[in-house]
Image: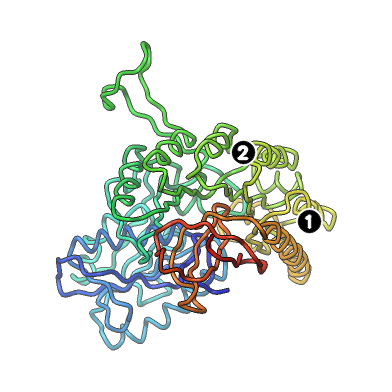
Amino acid sequence: MDLLIPDKVHDESRQGEALVLEPVGKNNGRKLYIESYGCAMNFSDSEIVASILAEKGFETTSDFNTADVIFINTCSIRENAEVRVRNRLKEFAGAKFRNPGMVVGVLGCMAERLKAKFLEEEKLVDVVVGPDAYRDLPNLIDQVDSGQRAVNVLLSREETYADISPVRLNSNGINAFVSIMRGCDNMCSFCVVPFTRGRERSRDAYSVVAECKDLFDKGYREVTLLGQNVDSYKWSRTVAESGEALSVGDEIKVVNFANLLEMVALVSPELRVRFSTSHPKDITDEVLHTIAKYDNICNYIHLPVQSGNSRILDIMNRTYDREWYMNRIDAIRSIIPDCAISTDIITGFCTETEEEHNDSVTMMDYVKYDFAYMFKYSERPGTLAAKRYADDIPEEVKQRRLAQIVAKQQQYSLYRMQARIGKIEKVLIEGFSKKSDKDYCGRSDQNAMVIFPVSEDYKPGQYVNVLVERTTSATLIGTIV
């Protein structure tokens, strides 16, 4: 079932979504059009960009033909995302021809990776800005206005945008993304993120809590803490800076991810807390026990496996093996018995044999994932894999293996959903279902979408208990009890 509320993950239906905001009072007479591709982090970054430019008087528009400034926030993870962006730029060319003063810019991961190509090949691109340089956008736009092209793709070891209060892309006023860190230190051989988003740095823990508290006070009832690898979150400050009395000998107060989860959960028991994404090498029992301790930390973990074979995991540079991953799954099942688990899987990675592919299939049988993002390997220029290994698996073999795991996952998604029939789910109402304004929709603790008839006693932003009566492979259907 298609729903009004966008999913908080890499949702294909959101790719190219334009950000439109209410005017904030300032107005310089110029209109901004910004659309996003890729993961939740990119959509969150677009909110930061909009906030920075709103302070300079820009208003947003949903029609790029009427814009004075067009930004496209890009993704380099998958090849089809880059193809979409290039095709979109061709569409913008017509608008720029009609309005020569229009500024067209490329933001995000593709901007950092392909900075020279954009300026040389895509002649209509005026501004190229990497993920750590958004504060410089007003200055860069001024440069273009004076007749120059403008580039800033410098990566930072410090930038976290902690002091910027993002405008909220999600208009339902119930769910919000909160970025807790930027960049990544994991050099997975298939991934461009360390090169496009820079080294990992964690945001001030107290600024995260303050943002979550502000959201709760404004009526939001669910936050998703975002990072490329949230489990490696670590922030510290000296006692002198914190002004807090610690035990004798303490000089540094360190906040890890388990601590941060608890701090956010304590904002209010009515504030739901989710997070994405975890890394199998870093997710600790301490994190799992914290999830189990607080009812408002959702029982849902996205734990990418990528491959079920230890040799393939080694050449992917994932830094764990099959047994380690299964140990983490066993820990989740033991400490949080009712936890839903989703994953990412890549088929047809360099040199993968049929037997090694089958290890991914048997891993799916072991875990029985609630949901999975499944891809065939697509070589990304500049990655370690592109430099070290030949992309030697034939396309038809990749496609066949992908089709096999997709079919397998459909089987387990239905299995997990059917297991919820007859159970009562606590659901946060997010809005009306797309099919009918007679039905509400919202997510369960385990992140399953739930559809149920509208009741005059409840409205979006409130919690309800829903008895699950039937299900599809993706949606629970029931009634309020």
Q: Residue 357 placed where, x, y %?
A: 79, 56
Question: What residue type is disc 1 on?
Answer: Val
Q: Which quadrant of the rendered structure holds the N terminus? A: bottom right
**Residue 270 visible within the image:** yes
Q: In the rendered image of this protein, does residue 29 appear above or below residue 91?
A: above
Say which label, 2 or 1, has the lower sequence index. Answer: 2
**Which residue has dot 2 on it?**
281
Residue nearest the viewer, comparing 203 with 275: 275
Q: Which mark is residue 2?
A: none
Q: Residue 89 placed where, x, y %?
A: 41, 77
Q: How many marks?
A: 2
Q: How is the image coloured?
A: rainbow
- Tell me the quarter of the picture where residue 266 sits: top left
Q: In the rendered image of this protein, does residue 295 appear above or below residue 345?
A: above
Label 2 packing within 10 angstroms: few (<14), some (14-19), many (20+):
some
Residue nearest the viewer, comparing 8 with 66: 8
Cα–Cα gap, marks 2 and 1: 21 Å
Q: In the rendered image of this protein, does residue 38 appear above or below residue 385?
A: below
**Which residue has dot 1 on it?**
361
**Residue 392 visible within the image:** no
Position of residue 351 in the picture relative to residue 93 (left or right): right
Q: Secondary structure at mark 2?
A: loop
Q: Secondary structure at mark 1?
A: helix
Label 1 packing within 10 angstroms: few (<14), some (14-19), many (20+):
many
Marks 2,1: beta carbons within 8 A: no
Question: What residue type is disc 2 on?
Answer: Lys
